[in-house]
Amino acid sequence: MRADFFHNPSIGDSFNARSTTIKELCATFISNIYFESLCSPNNVIMIGPRGSGKTTLMRMLEVEALDTWDKEIADNFRERIDFSGVFIPTDRFWKTQYDKLSSMTRAANENSFSTEILESIFIYHVLERLSSVIAYRASKTVIRANGYKKVDIDKETESELVEHLSEIWCITTKIKSLRGLSLALALKKQELSDYISRRTSNGDKSLPTELPTYIKSDLVRTLDLSIKIINAHFNLSNDKWAFLFDELELAPDNLVQPLVDAMRGGPENIIFKLALSPYHKGVSITNVATSTMKDQDLSFINLTGVKKKDGEAFAKELCSNVFHRNGLTNDIEEYFEHPPKVVWKTEFSQLYEKDPSFKEYLDKTGIDISKLDNYEEDTRTHIRKVQFIVQLRNYALRDNGKRKGRRRPASYYAGFKNICKAMEYNPRMLIGIMNMFIPIIKSEGIVSISKQLTCLSNYFESFRALLSTIAVNSNNKKYNTIYDLIKVVADVFRAEIYGQKFKSTPCGSLSFKNKVNSLSYREAIGYALNSGALIAEKNDIGAFHDVINIEQTKCRLSYIFAHQFGLLMTKQQDIDLMTILNDNAKINIVEPFTYYTHQMELL
Amino acid sequence: MSKIRLLVISDLHTTINNNFSDDSRLNFSDGKSEFGDGIISFLKSLDLEFDAILCAGDITNKACKQSFSAGWDYVNSIQKSLNIPRLFTVPGNHDHNSRVSDDYSPIHNLQFYKPSFPLSSHEKNTHFWAWNWCHLEEDKYNVVLLNSSAYHGYGDEFKHGRVALEVVDQIKDHMSHNNTREKIFNILLCHHHPEKMEYIDHDYDTEQMEGGKYLIDKLQDIDKGPWLIIHGHKHFANLSYASSNNNCPAIVLSAGSLSAKLYPSIKDRTSNQLYIIEVDINKTDLEGKLFGTVLTYEWDMVSGWKPSRSEHLPARGGFGCADTPKSLAQQIIKKFDEKENIQFIDSNDITEIQSKIDNLPPIDFRRLVQKLEEAGFSLSIDQNKIIEVGK
């Protein structure tokens, strides 16, 4: 059970599946189309920015979570999911040690035992999680809610299994039980980690002369052999196991790449499902000669750029759940003041009067405002495409055609559905902003449009603060953080809508066709994708591949920027990044604080 | 199993002034206390129904009247937030103006506090302030509230607690009287410790309640059910049996402080704590001695409120178990030896023994583990639950 002294979650920490109990995870989980895909018995690479729900989806595949999940649809998933999920979170302490040691060995130009030991700690970390799942499956003492994946083995078999595994895992298990095995693994990890700590803090001086024992095989081979032994003792020779690796962007490349490679023609009865941020420096999924994206054993799930219909349904269920838990039981949309209905004829007429360039556009296209509702489908489609530009432009211009001063964002961005869209249907962001609305509703009954926009702005500010923590190094002094780069792009997109001349197809997304110069921005673009500031437009392959092959990528700004910069929340034409930047500045991400802390960990 | 579940807090030392924020974490300097809100939200998260909340005094800090008001309101808000039907409390030395020199009474503020303190009943409250104790009757248990700081304000009395021998006789006579109905068990709530606690500071204990031993003896002479004594004051948690001349010793919970900042020599041995006592009504009624468990939750800066990891007190302990650690160890070893070709036994194999262990005080549980390890066994334990034993 987790109980916080700080009972009000902050925006950035509104929800984090890593630290949630299984009971709470199951109680709040909302299934979606991605979970359906993730349940397939295939190797999967799942890509999504921070807060997009990767950890939640992965954790829900764990045996204990599926066993605990007590909603109606859960039975269906328990029947379908034919593998035992082993969730593997990133061990941050290990990661710190790894980076520190890597840096030391690089500096000393050596390839020491320590690196080998450190890599074995990662293997022990995976085995510790595996052993906790086998212990859960075979436990005689845990009260099981649904008996999902339960196996009955007698104590003699259990002890025999433990002895076999202890031998190949190079550990000493005091109690020959599966629980004892888990404890022994934890102790082994501790022993090795202590050795590394001494090594990194004192060099070799205080180290014992004898090296600790550790696994010398690689992860995939170790898992292969372990699963064969486990299945034999469970008397389930074809039992499948899925290893669910979370936050792999934090893991070193030389551990990630073998996992990716093992997804093609890997060991029998083992499935890998890897969760990654959109950009992962140094690892390629697709550059292996034999690879093909149509490989039946490997599928991609891209959590970015959720479709409106799927996103709205998911967001409504998720946010309603949050409201219900806070005693707000009406239809969630009733708690949000709706923006006034837009009378398009009025909007068009007003802009026609004050904006000569719009007048010119309408006259040229022959669109008659008085017949706005009566056109054939082709013209109506065209009108629909420009109507929001008209609305925003009309809101921003005075009668004399000059720009109005700074005022609150247009009502265009208000309403429950638009707020969810601005949050990109990202679960963490949705929960975060809904928590801002709840006290307002409790005191006032409804969130006015003005307060909706204020909360959006406040949320944006915290997002901006987050982006501002990612420092960049550039020969152009105006780029100090990722946000500076994003702001330049956002300002250009804003000018496309509010510039001197009305544009019916303003640019609002980025392409990187100018490969030579764009390459220097690859890392910055990658970090912007990982933070959710940029959203890669979907294709069959997924954004991961696209950043590696940057010239094939198209991105748009997250809709969280829309109200702040007065941008549209619709798909728009692309423009090359180099055309926007119009200079040859180079940008590198600055790794902060110490050499062993990564920018990604700030996210 | 029928249970009476009690929430116990003590020694809040509430402050409203940042000048005293070094004394306590429960600070209402801006009218609210984040620490206080955190306790309530933690208790709510436990999703438990309590029969009563007991507060063993020192609600305020250094007799500050406004802080008393904030602290007493806070105690009441815990009761209200958790829908607890009963609230029992006594004043502590800090609630009295113990070192009165420029005031005319050490207890005036408490006696005339509105709404009335510590009881809402005028009659009971009058009895409490007149005789320094009162008796309250519940369905399954009796409660005696005792003011162990009643003589503060006179001479050196502020240095220790006191129960006048005449008061003890009064309590004994009242509780023994035919008109006083026998209940399954009895609670004595007071602020000072009735028996010396020299082990805390490895020094002579001069703060103990004078007359405390006499009190314990006389309570145990009353043949109307076993006694649970709950006190605070020392900020150092312990669970023990009182010295007794019979086979039914009183259980003594020395409650640690809910929120006071602890002094250096104890801060690594105990912590800011709250307790949930569950008295097993059936077993207690059947055996005529107290059976139950004590759950301890502690606060730290990193994790907030969580099951305690302190030795004083650990997350789980109990009282009432008649078996010694040695006997329990032998029972477990016998179970192990009964199973042939088996390298370990688990909690399913020792269910009956575990039910006895549940009522074992923490110190005896530590001894049990030690005895099994000395016999060459390895144990897997979770709080005071033995999950597996292997050799």
Image (cartoon, coloured by chain):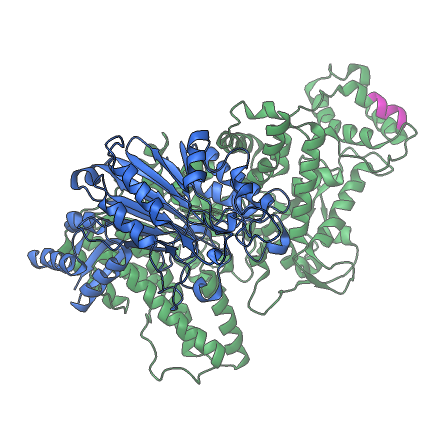
For residue A515, which quarter of the picture?
bottom right
Quadrant location, the C terminus of chain A: bottom right
Q: Nearer the viewer, residue A341 or A177?
A: A177
Q: Is residue A456 above or below residue B97?
A: above
Q: Position of residue B237 (x, y in %)?
A: 38, 56
Q: Tell me: A24 left or right of A485.
A: left
Q: Start and end of the magenta stretch?
A: A349-354
Picture residue at 28% right of the left edge, 42% below the top = B172
- Residue A84 visible, this orientation: no
Query: Which residue is outermost to the right?
Result: A400
**Location of residue A424 in the rendering, given as x and y in whole percent from the top left corner:** 60, 39
Q: Main secondary structure of the magenta part?
A: helix
Front residue (pair B220, A240): B220
- Against A153, residue B198 (above or below) is below
Name the residue: 46% across, 30% down.
B122
Left or right position of B274 against B110? left
The number of numbered badges drawn on the structure is: 0
Relative horizontal placement of residue A382, taking residue A545 as reference (left or right): right
* Horizontal side of residue A233 vs B122, given as left or right: left
**In green, which chain?**
A
- Residue B140 in the image, given as x and y percentages of width and height: 28, 33
Q: Is residue A372 magenta?
A: no
The color chain B is rendered in: blue
